């Protein structure tokens, strides 16, 4: 299994935020079919590029996606994913909300609760994200994961209304991580709830909204999750302090 190596002679030197993002991923193995030297960095460069767009568009969505990625990787490891599958999960989690760059500012950046009409516009972000990722050959393998991350086990989600095992497991993992971070995050119109309240909320919706085995994995992580979220927040603060390339 090939692992991305940052210090290779055929890679152009990077700096600032590009180096930081790349270094965070250097322990994540590439998919088996991308093992040649020339294809090592482009995948991560592309991820970094899209993450940068997300940060410029909406810093809150960027930091939320960073924490969702951290939780998702923990869940993938707990559920004994292979290293290459964890890499795909990590990429998809970072980009699960990339479709929000296509949501109007009046909706995406609104300081209060959304109206029903605005919520309908916001719900389009899963489909928009899918179409964005489908345009990049290196990201097509995570496009469906992003498309399905708001589906529910009982079929009441969106945009496809699929249920149970029809939903990719990676999407079910990201759905749990996404909800957990949304519950615990402060917004202009409400205060975030405690981690213990978030665990209970997720547990309450096990089997209806959320995948039971993913919920059980999350509950098993309750004693270590806080530490990992603190580390993710430190990474976000470091990223925000780094200079952009000229």
Image: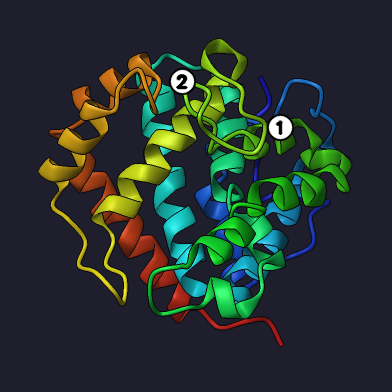
Q: Position of residue 172 (x, y in %)?
A: 48, 27
Residue 112 % position (x, y): 38, 76
Q: Is residue 51 visible?
A: yes
| Rendered residue at 61%/79% (across/down) | 105
Tell which tag, 2 or 1, sits nearer the viewer.
2
- Residue positioned 64% across, 39% down in the render: 146
Q: Secondary structure at mark 2?
A: loop
Asked if the residues shown at circle 2 and circle 1 are in contact, with their CB atoms under 8 angstroms apart, the answer is no
- Which quarter shows the C terminus? bottom right
Q: Position of residue 54 (x, y in %)?
A: 62, 66
- Residue 224 appears in the picture as rendered: no
- Whether residue 218 sits left or right of residue 159 in the image: it is left
- Observer-nearest residue: 193 or 106? 106
To which residue does mark 1 refer?
144
Q: Is residue 106 above or below residue 239?
A: below
Spot occupied by residue 90 in the image (x, y as percentages of width and height): 54, 39
Classify 10 Å Cα crowding around label 1: few (below 14), some (14-19), many (20 and above).
many
* Residue at 72% across, 63% down: 49
Residue indicated by mark 2: 154
- State how many labels appear: 2
Instruction: Residue 171: name its quadrant.
Output: top right
144 shown above or below 162: below
**Residue sitting nearer the eye, 7 or 237:** 237
Residue 66, above or below 206: below
Disc on the earlier residue, 2 or 1? 1
Q: Is residue 167 above or below residue 140?
A: above
Number of the label disc, if any, that sits on residue 225: none
SS for callout 1: helix
Point 35% across, 20% down: residue: 78
Residue positioned most to the front? 116
Taking the image as shown, residue 203 lies to the left or right of residue 111, namely left
Q: CA distance from mark 2 to mark 1?
A: 19 Å
């Amino acid at each position: 299994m090939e692992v991305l190596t940052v210090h290779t002679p055929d890679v152009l030197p990077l700096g600032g935020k590009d180096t930081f993002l790349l270094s965070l991923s250097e322990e994540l193995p590439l998919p088996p079919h991308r093992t040649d030297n020339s294809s090592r960095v482009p995948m991560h460069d592309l991820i970094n590029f899209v993450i940068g767009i997300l940060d410029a568009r909406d810093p809150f969505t960027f930091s939320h996606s960073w924490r969702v990625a951290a939780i998702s990787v923990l869940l993938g490891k707990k559920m004994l994913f292979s290293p290459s599958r964890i890499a795909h999960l990590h990429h998809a989690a970072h980009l699960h909300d990339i479709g929000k760059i296509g949501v109007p500012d009046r909706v995406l950046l609104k300081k209060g609760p959304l109206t029903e009409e605005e919520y309908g516009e916001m719900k389009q972000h899963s489909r928009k994200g899918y179409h964005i990722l489908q345009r990049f050959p290196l990201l097509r393998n995570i496009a469906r994961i992003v498309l399905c991350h708001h589906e529910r086990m009982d079929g009441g989600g969106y945009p496809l209304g699929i249920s149970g095992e029809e939903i990719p497991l990676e999407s079910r993992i990201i759905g749990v991580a996404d909800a957990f971070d949304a519950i615990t995050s402060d917004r202009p119109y409400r205060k975030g709830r405690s981690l213990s309240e978030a665990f209970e909320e997720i547990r309450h919706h096990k089997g209806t909204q959320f995948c039971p085995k993913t919920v059980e994995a999350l509950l098993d992580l309750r004693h270590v999750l806080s530490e990992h979220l603190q580390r993710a927040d430190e990474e976000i603060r470091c990223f925000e302090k780094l200079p952009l390339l000229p």
